[in-house]
Image (spheres, grey):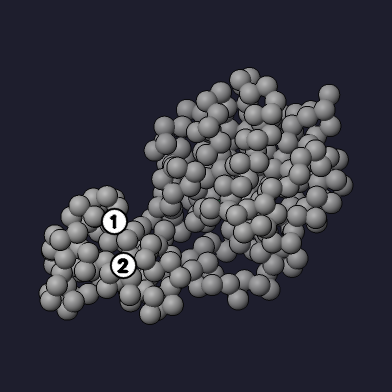
Amino acid sequence: MSASASSSPSIEHVRRKLAERFRNGGIDSAELDARLLTGDVLGLDLTGMIAAAGRMLTSSESDRLESFAQRRLAGEPVARILGRKEFWGLSLQLSPATLVPRPDTETVVELALQILRAGASDRPLWIADLGTGSGAILLALLSELPQARGVGTDISTAALQTAAANAARAGLAHRAGFVACEYASGLSGPFDLIVSNPPYIRSADIAGLATEVRDHDPPAALDGGADGLDAYRALIPQAANRLAPGAALVVEAGQGQSADIEALMNAAGLMPAWPPKADLAGVWRAVAGQKSPP
Ligand SMILES: C[S@@+](CC[C@H](N)C(=O)[O-])C[C@H]1O[C@@H](n2cnc3c(N)ncnc32)[C@H](O)[C@@H]1O
């Protein structure tokens, strides 16, 4: 970076060269990653970068961007380098203990909102998010539902600290609480909605994951046991016992897991009242079950 910066170090030139290095390094999202990293170093959004395209980088900006570039080329995701990720319009801080929230998980938020809004939508709501990580799902729901309060649980106290900081940053701390426990075991309910995106990767598949995931997401956020379903076996009966009559459990499913999850929900007495929802790739990503209505 320093060499190219000294020959023609305008923002636009540096951003294009970085994208080219990322493409040559086999990074699929080369253009986007180059734009995000360059923008972060300069403190500029896309519009600001276009407006300042001809401005030269300072040497400290060049050095910082080169350090980011090397981390990205070594397989570190942009979100980890920046320490934050956008989810449902919220800018969420990350820590080593939190999963990087994925766009697919917005499917869980969409299905949960669809279910809640089909009912009486202005009554107070009490929501639980099991395995909350950065707080992504809970905070997205609270941002949409001003009459709702919620609690996020996690076995990682470090993740819960990050989630609580994210709640404060989003102006939602007065409606969000966080509890360290195994899924719903420390909660009493009854809840009007329970959501969860638990670890669901088969243990044997973890070694073959992309380095961005395997080496940078916390193992406790990934490993779902031998068949990937351990977390669902633990949390579905717990959730079923803590739902209000007629209320929904909505969980994220890994590819090919939706039928198994529906069977576990059925065994716990939850009915398939709403069809699963597919993500943008056509994977059945959000699965819901309903506690018997009163
Ligand atoms: C796949 S991550 C999801 C994080 C966040 N909900 C999201 O969607 O971005 C799973 C989360 O479950 C937590 N977790 C793993 N085992 C758990 C358990 N037994 N009880 C509670 N949380 C658990 C992990 O620490 C991690 O934060």
Can residue 238 be seen here?
no
**138 shown above or below 76:** above
Whole-number angstrom distance, CA of label 1 to CA of label 2: 10 Å
Residue 230 visible in image: yes
Contact check, label 1 and label 2, Cβ < 8 Å: yes
- Residue 292 position in % (x across, y down): 84, 32
Along the polypeptide, which appears first: circle 1 or circle 2?
1
Residue occupying image coordinates x 61% and y 41%:
110
Picture quarter with the C terminus? top right
For the residue with label 2, is its CB less than 8 Å from the closest atom of ligand 1?
Answer: no
The residue depicted at 55 percent of the width and 29 percent of the height is 145
Residue 66 lies, in percent from the top left, at: 26, 71
Q: Quadrant of the N terminus?
A: bottom left
Residue designated by label 2: 68
Disc 1 CB within 8 Å of nearest ligand 1 atom = no
| Disc 2 residue type (three-letter) | Phe
Q: Residue at x 54, y 72 (%)?
A: 210
> Crowding near pointer 1: few (<14 within 10 Å), some, many (20+)?
some
Q: In this orientation, which residue lies closer to the viewer: 171 or 69? A: 69
Q: Taking 29 as reference, is 43 left or right?
A: left
Q: Nearer the viewer, residue 114 or 53?
A: 53
Q: Is residue 10 left or right of residue 165?
A: left
The residue nearer to you, when weighing 50 against 56, is 50
**Dot 2: within a 10 Å radius of its alpha carbon, few (fewer than 14), some, or many (20 or more) residues?**
many
The x and y percentages for residue 20 are: 33, 75
Q: Quadrant of residue 179?
A: top right
Q: Residue sitting at 24 percent across and 55 percent down?
A: 49
In the rendered image of this protein, does residue 70 appear above or below residue 219?
below
The residue pinned by badge 1 equals: 40
How far across and down, in percent of the image, does residue 6 sit?
Answer: 12, 74
- Helix, strand, or loop for circle 1? helix
| Residue type of the residue flagged with mark 1 | Asp
